[in-house]
Amino acid sequence: MHLQQIKLTNFRNYEFQSIEFSDRLNLIAGLNGMGKTNLLDAIYYLSMGKSHFQSTEKNVVRKGEQFFRLEGHFLLEKTEKIVAKVVPGEQKTIERNDNPYPRLSDHVGLLPVVFMTPDDTALALDGSEERRRFLDNTLCQLDHSYLEALVVYNRLLDKRNALLRQFSTNGTFNSLLLQTYDQQMEGPTVVIFEKRKWFIQQFQPVFNEFYARISNEKETVECNYRSQLEETELADLLAKNLERDRVLLRTTTGVHKDDLHFQLKGFPLKRFASQGQLKSFVLAMKLAQFELLRQQKNKNPILLLDDLFDKLDDDRVSQLIELLVKGDFGQVFITDTHPERAEGIAMRFGGAYKKLLVENGSVQA
């Protein structure tokens, strides 16, 4: 699988651009703020039906414009034309070969993608929401039943939280009404919990292998799944924490509180890792994500690597390039602020590649 061509209209800082790509390596060079990351985000959008960075479409459309459009031609068994048409706040349509999807979620998983950015160190340093996002991003691409369970669970969670706020505002309480949401949440909870457990079992050995190769086996790492559901069923958790929920006006227990615990040489990662170790850890996670998607989907995901070599020492850069050169990573996109370094990477690959220069939302081959 690879992306042959993309057309951007009013997407972030691009007015209009049509770009053709190499099926192997694509180097995107330019200064910061020119649009390198935005180009990768457009590829991600066509794969996932949303921006990697922005939660609302109004922050994606080009300043002063009312809509944006993306068109991508992907080669699978045959060429697939994927189009995203978005009028922020009004309309959003994803089309496959000129046929709109009945539901946007139906598109997720067709075009697997892995995106690594400099901000991904938030996986280790920030709160649990970032780590759940990593779990959800991977599993939604792997398993449509997981995506459906997650959508249902989040909708019920929102309704339960709204009901708790309503009780507080009105000075009332109806335990039977609350229990109807509790009971409906049990089914999707089991699906989410079991599939997350399965994922970590598959993920851990692959992740360990990639980290060892990137770090030249200098350190050992661990990634463990933690959930309140490991010891107590959802119904008991909700009942036990009911009074707390009523005080805080939100649901304080459930799979939306799950987390991943990271360790480096037996110590908490966020407290003891250097910048290089943090970036190596996150990179190993993303490459392991790639490998599991590849195994389960029987095709190489598109690999998007944004500002890849920032905060990596020369030894880790060398190990990483060797890994990318020798590995079966399919189509790879790498952004870099140093064109000469990008050229050096391309020479190491030894095969066909395409170099693109980006300046102020304009791309030159």
Image (spheres, grey):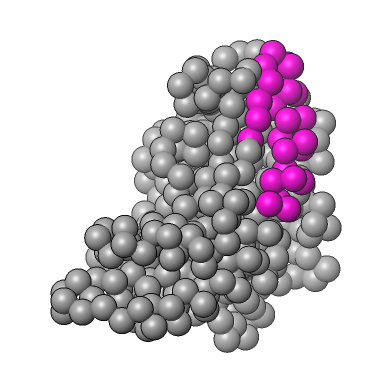
Q: Report the span colored magenta.
A: 197-223
Q: Residue at the spot x=33%, y=69% of the render?
A: 161
* Percent x, y of residue 134: 56, 49
State the image coordinates of residue 166 (x, y, percent, origin top left).
23, 76
Instruction: Please identify the quadrant where the N terminus is shown.
Output: bottom right
Residue 14 occupies which quadrant of the picture?
A: bottom left
Count the marks: how many? 0
Q: Nearer the viewer, residue 37 or 242?
A: 242
The residue sitting at 51% across, 77% down in the picture is 183
Q: Is residue 294 left or right of residue 237?
A: right
Image quadrant containing the C terminus: top right
In the rendered image, the vertical position of residue 187 relative to residue 134, given as above or below: below
Q: Residue at x 61, y 44 (%)?
A: 225
Q: Main secondary structure of the magenta part?
A: helix
**128 within the magenta span:** no
* Residue depicted at 72% across the width and 38% down the height: 204
Please state which of residues 115 and 227 is positioned toward the viewer in this rendering.
227
- Which percent across, then down, holds residue 137? 58, 56
Pick the front one: 52 or 160: 160
Q: Quadrant of residue 86?
A: bottom left
Find the residue positioned furthest to the left.
Answer: 170
Pinpoint residue 278: horizontal percent, then vertical percent: 53, 26
